[in-house]
Image (tube, rainbow, N blue to C red):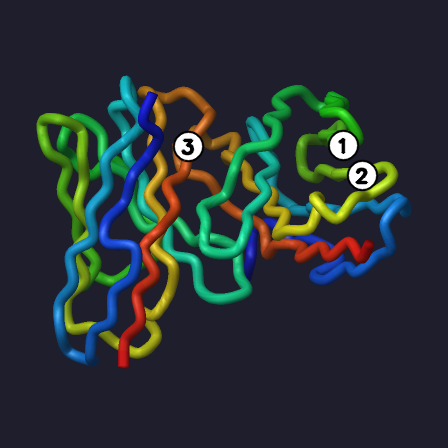
Amino acid sequence: DAGVTQSPTHLIKTRGQQVTLRCSPKSGHDTVSWYQQALGQGPQFIFQYYEEEERQRGNFPDRFSGHQFPNYSSELNVNALLLGDSALYLCASNLGSTDTQYFGPGTRLTVL
Amino acid sequence: TQLLEQSPQFLSIQEGENLTVYCNSSSVFSSLQWYRQEPGEGPVLLVTVVTGGEVKKLKRLTFQFGDARKDSSLHITAAQPGDTGLYLCAGRLLTGANNLFFGTGTRLTVIP
């Protein structure tokens, strides 16, 4: 049973560029959430996708956008990258409104 | 301002010692979860508590949810080097929002 997978593992970009991160949820899950974890801090909620729509959003600017595909996989897009966007980006999946979210290994984004 | 505050932020103890990590908030949560995160990996769920006053045990780990569902604690008995990691509490607000709010994290190091 495949868990949550994310790609790429690591990514280096320069300021002003755009980036797309990808996530495949755990088998049987239909809800995907994205989190940003800065070094030494707890994850911060970015947004959640369910039935291909953004269901909920945290306190992140519009530069952060996402998408969910019919197969429940998801993408996180960040435009006009800033140095402060450097972080570990985590994807989590769950089924419907159930409590337990399973996390992927994350994508480490470095913005130079 | 972080919704969930954890203390201590850092903890370094000798193998065999006991420790307690605290997770506090002024908000009420419908459920609270504890995760452990290793470097370069996503958080792994340890336990979910949903009832005020609930106590759950997982081998040498004891988790408690406060009566008012605003706080939680994690107690580790006879810590082992394998317990080393970042411990995160995370909760869902009683308002019904589906996203998790994470605590600030406690970095535990158990010295052999």
Compared to residue A82, the image places residue A105 above or below, namely above
Query: Which residue type does callout 3 highlight?
Result: Tyr
Question: x, y (%) of residue A47?
Answer: 29, 45
Q: Quadrant of the C terminus of chain B?
A: bottom right
**Amino acid type, mark 2:** Ile
Image disc number at residue A102: 3
Q: Position of residue A31 (x, y in %)?
A: 28, 29
Q: Is residue B17 shown left or right of residue B74?
A: right
Q: SS for tag 1? A: strand
Mark seen at residue B76: 2
The kind of residue on which mark 1 rests is Leu
Q: Which mark is residue B34?
A: none
Mark 2 surroundings: few (<14), some (14-19) or many (≥20) residues within 10 A: many
Residue contact at pointers 2 and 1, CB within 8 angstroms: yes
Q: Is residue A28 left or right of residue B93?
A: left
Q: Secondary structure at mark 3?
A: strand
